[in-house]
Amino acid sequence: MSAADVASLTGHPDILVDAGVSNSTAFGRYQFTVDTWNQFGSGGMTPATQDEAMNGLMDQLGMIQDAMSGQIAQAIWDGNGRWASLPDSRSNQNPKSWAETIAAFQNALQTLPECQ
């Protein structure tokens, strides 16, 4: 599915896929499950609405406050119970390394206007 196809969706597609280890409805740029999308997302699966939903999830988990105060490792710990690709995630689904994740957080803090 191309980015244009994803942007035209009116909501999460809610398709259960056999992911080998387990079944999942994960979809989109942050791999939202349908339950998480229903809690934090609204409308179509555009990049902007996915970013808004992820910001809502990160805020609820305390990740934003910790990252903004320089506690990046704590921000990652705050989210790794819910976000499968974070280091030491309980889901063990090919998580990113600590170094890669910390670098991504630091880059966001230095470059995103909303983090200034």
Image (tube, rainbow, N blue to C red):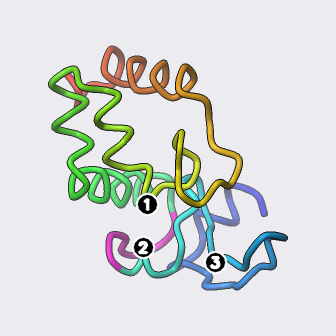
Residue 78, percent from left and from top: 31, 47
Q: Over which residues does the magenta segment extend?
A: 39-45
Q: Which badge, 1 or 3, is on the more N-terminal residue?
A: 3
Identify residue type, mark 3. Answer: Thr
Identify residue type, mark 1. Answer: Arg
Mark 1 to mark 3 CA distance (whole Å): 14 Å
Helix, strand or loop status at disc 3: loop
Mark 2 to mark 1 CA distance (whole Å): 9 Å
In this rendering, the answer to whether 14 lies above or below 22 is below
- Mark 2 = which residue? 36
- Mark 1 = which residue? 82
Image position of 60 (left or right of 39): left
Magenta stretch holds residue 53: no
Q: Residue placed at 78% from the left, 63% from the top?
A: 1
Query: For residue 53, what is the image quadrant?
Result: bottom left
Q: Which badge, 3 or 2, is on the more N-terminal residue?
A: 3
Mark 2 nearby-residue class (10 Å; few <14, some 14–19, many ≥20): some
Residue 105, percent from left and from top: 40, 26
